[in-house]
Amino acid sequence: MDYLSKNIYQIHEALVNKEVTPLDLVIEALEKIKKDTNNAFEYIYEKEAIEIAEVLSKEEVEIDNPLWGIPFAIKDNFSTKDIPTCASSKLLEGYIPPFDSEVYTRLLNKKAIPIAKTTLDELAMGGTGSSGHKGKTFNPWDETKTRMIGGSSCGSAASCAAGIVPYSIGSDTGDSVRKPASYSALVGFKPTWGRISRYGLFTFSASLDHVAYFTRNVKDSALLLSVLSGRDDKDTTSSTLEVENYLSKMDEKHKPYKLAVIKDIYDDVSDKNIKSAFDKMINDLKEKGYKINTFSIGFDLAKIIYSTYYIISSAEATSNNANLDGIKFGVNKDADTYEEMLFKVRSEGFSDRIKRRFVIGSLSLLEENQQEIYLRALRARRLIVDTFNKILEDNDAIILPASPTVAPLFGDDIPKKSFNKDASIAENYLAFANLGGYPSITLPLGFENELPFGVNITSHHFTESKLLSIAKEVEEVTKLKDLVHK
Amino acid sequence: MKCEAIIGLEIHLQLLSESKLFSGAPAKYSKEPNTQVAVLDMAFPGSMPVLNKRCVISAIRMVNALHMELDRLIRFDRKNYFYSDLAKGYQLTQFYHPIGKNGHLAINVNDGIKIIRINHLHIEEDAAKQIHLENKTLLDFNRSGMGLIEIVTDPDIRNGKEARVFLEDIRDIAVSLDVSNGRLQEGSMRVDVNVSLKVDGVNGEIVELKNLNGFKNVEKAINSEINRQKEIIINGKKVEPETRRYDENKNTTVFMRKKNTKIDYRYFADATIAPVRISDELIKEALNYQPVHRIDFDFLTKETIDEINHSSYLKHLFSKLEEKNIATLKVANFVLTRVRNEIKRDGSDLLIKIEDDLLSLLTMYEDDKLSYKQTSIIYQQLMKNSQPLNEILEEYNFTNEVEEDELSAIIDETLIQYIDAVNDYKNGKDKALNFLLGQIYKRTKNNIDSIKAKELLLNKLEEK
């Protein structure tokens, strides 16, 4: 019996038809988790999930609620009441939050069943899925266990890709959901900044952080958006704009879409298979009547997307993580003075990668450097966003390969490569959607030696319905959906 | 040698409000440590700030009273530093865009008017409270996240007296606008003073005076500091930039610490609070407020008076009672026994809605048109907020108290009808008395004085 490799609607149908009960699903998930070798989990709801499922199994299936009784996984940087939450940081081992994040509350209200908290790069900072306190999280598509699934939402990606849960929640500050989705044949979606409440998401960089998630097809993604989006008074940055009926609007009749390809980024992809799969998809879309325009934003601007992201996110991160001093929660250390304790807790608790971000972030905010580094990054952000705004005003969306390669081998240290002058543009450009706060979705595009790679589509603020509609048509063209590594 | 003192003030005022600046936890002082704390006040990961409207209203009132330019877009910045009492590791403040700029206050000193310019006014949050014991420090997060405003003057003050008069005026304005208690002794108002001497047109080093706990002490501390600096200069030495406190007994300032290294707070704009645009309606709401003066009645204890003045709603209600000429011990007792609990439990939102009806009800009570019990019953109905006062009165028909002879007749009837109960009572069953009373209440629809009724009933039972 393998229901959890199906998509949400298929599992829901099986529940409605009484082929399966929530308890069966939970047991299937727990068995799969036990056998899993990808190191995707921080906490497993062994007892709790069975308890919820037992209650639900006695109730009527809610026919109009497709999430009812279906297990999901959630990244361990979402606050979950009474459930250990450490954001894969040594410093937060043993921390049990006293409150629930809004996203989690909304899923529980839908009677979805939490099955696991998943691994991440420590405090969501990193793109390799290897910097957490539990080490590397592996890519289920690579049986040799030498390739990353990418981060920082590595555990959420791996648990969905391995057929353990049909969807999983992550967060995306630079590309932390949309990049792993490319490496694992999943749909990874980050709606507009402000569309989903971030209350309870551990803040990494508030101006860039987004709640995002993995599903196995576009329709499931639209379903989740309708559940998770909407104003939450606990997060004042959440939008008061009305939530649309994404599922029905996605299927509405429309004029052929106009898509933009950014030449500077496209040209930076050297992998021939990826390029030809992308070209083929573009041709198929043209045949459907799509209009495809090519734009150049200039090599220099394309090049600074990542450094702009890195400076702003690191600067904000040093402040957002200043609460981790061991006094109020998390790991405490004996010391004679506050300063000594702070020093011990933070130098022993954080990994070197995090410290590097904090040092860079702090330096960029110092009075003597702020003009030259931090404020310059803010100006660069303005420039980048103005450029993309213009393109998105004239086009329905931007479409590009989501990554220039398939899942890289561990040891290919992306951050180190990202700042030298040969740094890949196509590797790091996805952060433009965080800098601008645009809705952005990655979905499968093809395979190379049985390893997946994806395509990314990004549209203007609060045009999720249109974006999902485009994504669905791309999905029809690629015929790649509901993919699970077995 | 021409020598002039240059003095500037930085004033912190604790804001009066039901809840804290960003967290929704109650903004109450003198409570059990660490009981008035929301997740944000201890910076639990993922907690987010939500700006308190009442604190913004207070800031708008002060900005208006001090003739300042109002910044209609409220934004916050982060002041970053590590300290054990700073839960988040940064303080939310308005560094780049203070809510008020370029104001002034005219003070009256030595029978003349002097204008003191005010540089800016901003909103910020308080830190937790440290309690230092012999070999450890305890933290009380009740204060963490409380709302403050900081008022920073230009260096227009020239001596201790001007500073004292200015501070007293600020205190009076803050208290009358219901912005703050403004108590220097208790820390709800705090002041830092920057004093330097300008000698022959050349500015000297700035000395900061801290921990000043009284308006008179501010005056004395400034004057003694000016004298100290003068003496240093006369002796040909240099004033060092440092922080000093005031020793009341010796009437002199005392060295605390050097001020030679400037701390870099790495200020930058916060992105967890959506910027708030101040609407015309909000300004109207803030400024339409009737200033409330301190409530004081000689028939209440000092503690009770303090409590009333500390609760913005109670204070407001008592000022209304004064207006209506019903601020009597009788009405005060009713408010303090019944209404006070309501405020403690549920806040004042509902009370504000039914205020007119409540005042009419209290007037009827004061005029002896209703008994305590009747007033209580109607008050309860009012608090359900389902119907207006006149409807409730109609329904209960409490319009007139039953006259004594009518009451006597009703009791007689009751005793005849329930003769069994009368016998039960005679046989020592006390419960029967309550039963009989209940029947009497029913027949009179509660329109009686319960004590009088019981007395009359007992007399009649004796006679039987």
Image (tube, rainbow, N blue to C red):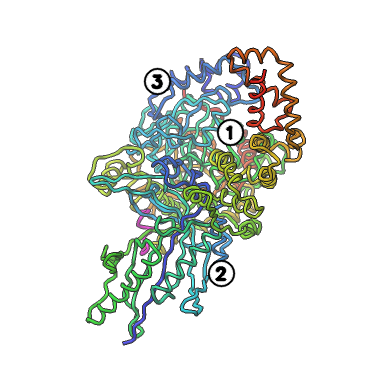
Q: Amino acid at mark 2?
A: His
Chain containing mark 2: B
CA separation in Å, label 2 and label 1 = 51 Å
Q: Which label sits in the foreground, 2 or 3?
A: 2
For disc 1, the marked residue is: A224
Pointer 2 local density, CA inside 10 Å: few below 14, some 14–19, many at least 20: some
**Residue extent of the magenta highlight:** A360-368
First of labels 1, 3 by sequence position = 3
Query: Is label 1 on the same chain as label 3?
Result: yes
Give the alpha-carbon distance from disc 1 to disc 3, as whole Å.
27 Å
As helix, strand or loop, the secondary structure at mark 1 comes to helix
Residue type of the residue flagged with mark 1? Leu
Type of secondary structure dominating the magenta stretch: helix
The circle on residue B191 is none
Residue placed most toward the observer, B39 or B325 = B325
The verdict on a common chain for dots 2 and 1 is no
Q: Disc 2 designates what residue? A: B67
Residue found at x 37% / y 45%? B140
Name the mark on residue A34: 3
